[in-house]
Image (tube, rainbow, N blue to C red):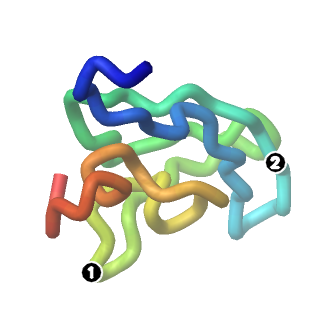
Amino acid sequence: MSDGAAAFIRLSTITCPECGHREIETMPTDACQYFYDCKGCGAVLKPLTGDCCVYCSYGDVKCPPIQSDRSTC
């Protein structure tokens, strides 16, 4: 039975465009994450133009605000 709360996928696998390292991370539901430090090579990832956060740019699952059909974080 649903209590009316939106259900989000909270885990996303971020893939570093520099070294290809993949890491499963838990996404915040109440804020965008603008920076991410790659655990493979140390590169600081930033969102691509037009994306609101690193999960939308490099993750295999978009962030919770985008999942809920909001236009931006």
Mark 2 Cα within 10 Å, few/some/many (few <14, many 20+)? some
Q: Residue furthest bottom?
A: 49
Residue 51: x and y in percent read: 32, 71
Kind of residue indicated by mark 1: Gly
Mark 1 Cα within 10 Å, few/some/many (few <14, many 20+)? few
Q: Residue at x 26, y 42 (%)?
A: 32
Q: Quadrant of residue 25?
A: top right
Q: Where 43 falls versus 2 (above or below)?
A: below
Residue 72: x and y in percent read: 16, 62
Kind of residue indicated by mark 2: Arg
Q: Which mark is residue 50?
A: 1
Q: Where 31 falls versus 41 (above or below)?
A: above
Q: Which mark is residue 28?
A: none
Q: Residue at x 53, y 39 (%)?
A: 9
Does 68 sit left or right of 25 as displayed? left
Residue under circle 2? 22
Tag 2, which secondary structure? strand
Q: Where 23 falls versus 44 (above or below)?
A: above
Tag 1, which secondary structure? loop
Does 32 sit left or right of 17 as displayed? left
Could you say which is closer to the camera, residue 50 or residue 18?
50
Residue 21: x and y in percent read: 84, 50
Q: Residue at x 63, y 43 (%)?
A: 12
Residue 73: x and y in percent read: 18, 52
- Report the quarter where the N terminus lies: top left
Q: Quadrant of residue 69?
A: bottom left
Q: Quadrant of residue 2?
A: top left
Could you say which is closer to the camera, residue 48 or residue 69?
69
How far apart marks 2 and 1 lie (CA) works out to 22 Å
Name which of mark 2 and mark 1 comes first in the sequence: 2
